[in-house]
Amino acid sequence: MMKGILLALVLAISVMGNVAAQGYYALVDSAEFYIGKHEWAEAEKFIGMALKKDPDNQNTSLLMSNLATVQRYQGKNDEALRNYTVALFMTPNAVTLLRNRASLYLDMDSIDKAYADYSRVLELDEYDIEALYNRGVLALEKKKMDESKADFQKIKDISPNSYFVYNGFAMWNKANGNYAKAIENYDVIIKERPSINALANRAECYLELKQLNSAEEDIRNALSTDSRNGYLYLLRARLNKLRFETDAARRDIQLAEEYGVEEAVIKSFLDIE
């Protein structure tokens, strides 16, 4: 038994020695191997070793970006943010890095900083449709209606039939109370790329216009795909409230709560004191 333990220790030391002896590009290859397998912790380890092996390598910025990404997949957002920022310090005009950091800022609810990063992307490439769309959505959240509309219009000028055009203007029209126009946009989206989100948003527009049968159909279709979506039950509660079906509305409120909708959201949406 002692011989077996000693053999295991010798093998472990040998493996550690081989890892330590690996050259820079071998370490990078190992990191890429683990990234391909979605084994983020192992990928992070090998990227870190490569960075220590040759910190002045011309690929350091790219490695720092990859390190940030695998950390993000592990929920290490603060570390990921720090490394994206370091990589951008090295290569300040790297559009992919700016997009990645902007996306991380959104995960961290740093809307203003995400907006700034997307704006920087557009300084470097004014035709970047993804950045235009994301900045337009953020401008909408920030109540910058003119700026939001301008970004969506720019997408339309670049690619008139893009999904981003219809979805952008659907959100913009809905936010500005242009429910009939928003429904037209959602009609195109649902025909080309149906989703629960699009059905739910169109249903909400129908509810605002008191087109209750159309709203009911969208809610029913969405629930047939996802019966555990609390927002859909909230929409149906509002539908039943408009139809004065009190018991049905109460049941849907309970379901909305059961599936994660906060009480404050429910009260605000249904105008309950």
Image: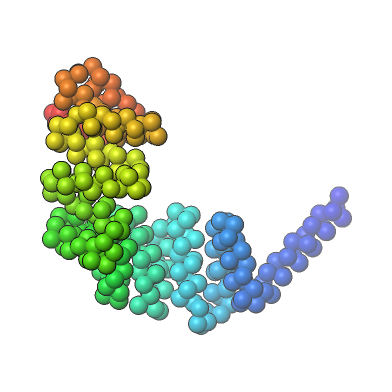
Q: Residue furthest top?
A: 247
Task: Measuring from the top left, give residue 157's x and y in whole percent.
Answer: 23, 66
Residue 110 showing in the rendered view: no
Colour scheme employed for the rendering of this structure: rainbow
113 relative to 268 in the view: left or right: right
For the C terminus, the image quarter is top left
Residue 228 occupies which quadrant of the picture? top left
58 relative to 11 in the view: left or right: left
Q: Nearer the viewer, residue 193 or 147?
A: 193
Q: Is residue 165 above or below residue 257?
A: below
Residue at the spot 23% in from the left edge and 17% down from the top edge: 247
Q: Nearer the viewer, residue 150 or 80?
A: 150
64 relative to 184 in the view: left or right: right
Task: Measuring from the top left, give residue 268's x and y in whole percent.
Answer: 17, 35
Residue at the spot 47% in from the left edge and 60% down from the top edge: 71
Numbered disc total: 0
Residue 230 occupies which quadrant of the picture? top left
Q: Is residue 205 above or below residue 227?
A: below
115 relative to 14 in the view: left or right: left
Residue 20 occupies which quadrant of the picture? bottom right
Task: Measuring from the top left, give residue 262's x and y in whole percent.
Answer: 27, 35
Residue 37 showing in the rendered view: yes
Task: Measuring from the top left, give residue 102's x and y in whole percent.
Answer: 33, 63
Residue at the spot 26% in from the left edge and 29% down from the top edge: 216
